[in-house]
């Protein structure tokens, strides 16, 4: 099974690469009223934001702090500036976005950009600029797709469609950028066959990487409130059941699509369910035993 490290080695031979998360003060159109309010019902941004990230700090300072955090273990490491928080191409002008990305690339040892965003918030103007950067420095776009089922996308308050995903991946590929998708397994109302239907649609898209993880129910989210109120139900997976589903997914995926991760790891103090107590590498080791 080809790993994400193998994938990155195509761009950075003989280098150890680490993503450094950045909070550049973005929002989302399903938070600010453009498409809705409250954001995705499962989202709690502080569950995956490192301690060195603070939107009050300039992008460069966050990256410098991140480098210091990792340099203790790996002094020879190089880094990707990862615009992870919220929607990394939204609620700022193209000029402001370009300034932010340039600020990141000007930091020593930053060798590429990873931009997490939605499929409905990437302008042609921005793609043109990112394509220019990519001719010299790799640019990776991570699109939050979550599922191919529009009914589910409405239920979880994403407020975009699968067609948006199809169109965005095509534009990103045409711009010569490196595109990946993010999917969630165990969304309300979806069984295993619906997940596999999404995978069959994903493999038809011009993407290079895939992030898959189990739905985590986190404290303080609209998802938890809806579950407690009996408004929605979510499928419950044991570790073994999830492994079996991941094996079915891997059988569908072609060799040219690399799975970056299979597991979400929010802080245990925030997790209501599932409480598997596994890190991503531990889950991958379990998965490999079944391949």
Image: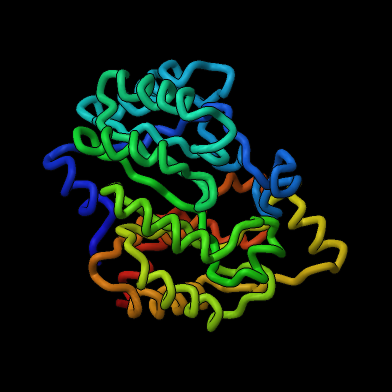
From the image, which quarter does the C terminus lie in?
bottom left
Who is closer to the viewer here, 235 or 160? Answer: 160
- Outermost residue toward the front? 125
Specify whether 272 is left or right of 3. right
Residue nearest the viewer, comparing 51 with 211: 211
Indicate the position of residue 58 as horizontal and vertical percent values. 49, 16
Which x, y percent locates residue 168?
Answer: 44, 55
* Image-based side of 25 in relation to 69, left or right: right
Question: Relative to 111, does residue 121 appear above or below in the rendering?
Answer: below
Q: Outermost residue, left direction?
A: 14
Image point (69%, 60%), residue name: 156
Q: Nearer the viewer, residue 26 or 125?
A: 125
Q: Is residue 265 visible?
A: no
User: Does residue 18 appear left or right of residue 184 in this picture?
Assistant: left
Q: Residue at x 53, y 45 (%)?
A: 121
Residue 63 spot, x, y in % from top left: 40, 23
Residue 1 % position (x, y): 24, 67
């Amino acid at each position: 099974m080809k790993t994400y490290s193998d994938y990155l080695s195509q761009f950075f031979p003989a280098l150890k690469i680490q993503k450094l998360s950045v909070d550049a003060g973005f929002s989302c159109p399903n938070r600010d009223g453009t498409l809705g309010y409250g954001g995705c019902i499962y989202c709690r941004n502080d569950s995956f934001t490192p301690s060195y990230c603070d939107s009050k700090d300039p992008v460069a300072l966050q990256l410098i702090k991140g480098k210091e955090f990792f340099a203790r273990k790996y002094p020879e490491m190089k880094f990707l500036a990862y615009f992870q928080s919220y929607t990394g191409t939204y609620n700022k002008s193209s000029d402001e976005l370009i300034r932010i990305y340039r600020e990141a690339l000007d930091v020593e040892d930053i060798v590429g950009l990873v931009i997490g965003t939605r499929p409905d918030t990437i302008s042609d103007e921005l793609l043109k600029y990112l394509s220019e950067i990519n001719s010299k420095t790799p640019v990776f776009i991570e699109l939050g797709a979550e599922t191919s089922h529009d009914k589910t996308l409405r239920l979880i308050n994403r407020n975009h469609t699968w067609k948006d995903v199809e169109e965005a991946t095509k534009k990103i590929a045409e711009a010569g950028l490196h595109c990946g998708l993010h999917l969630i397994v165990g969304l309300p109302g979806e069984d295993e066959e619906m997940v596999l239907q999404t995978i069959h649609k994903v493999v038809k898209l011009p993407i290079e990487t895939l992030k898959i993880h189990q739905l985590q129910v986190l404290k303080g989210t609209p998802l938890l409130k809806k579950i407690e109120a009996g408004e929605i139900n979510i499928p419950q997976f044991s570790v073994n059941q999830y492994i079996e589903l991941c094996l079915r997914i891997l059988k569908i995926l072609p060799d040219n699509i690399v799975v970056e991760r299979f597991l979400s790891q929010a802080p245990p103090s925030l997790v209501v369910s599932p409480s598997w107590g596994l890190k991503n590498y531990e889950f991958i080791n379990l998965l490999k035993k079944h391949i």
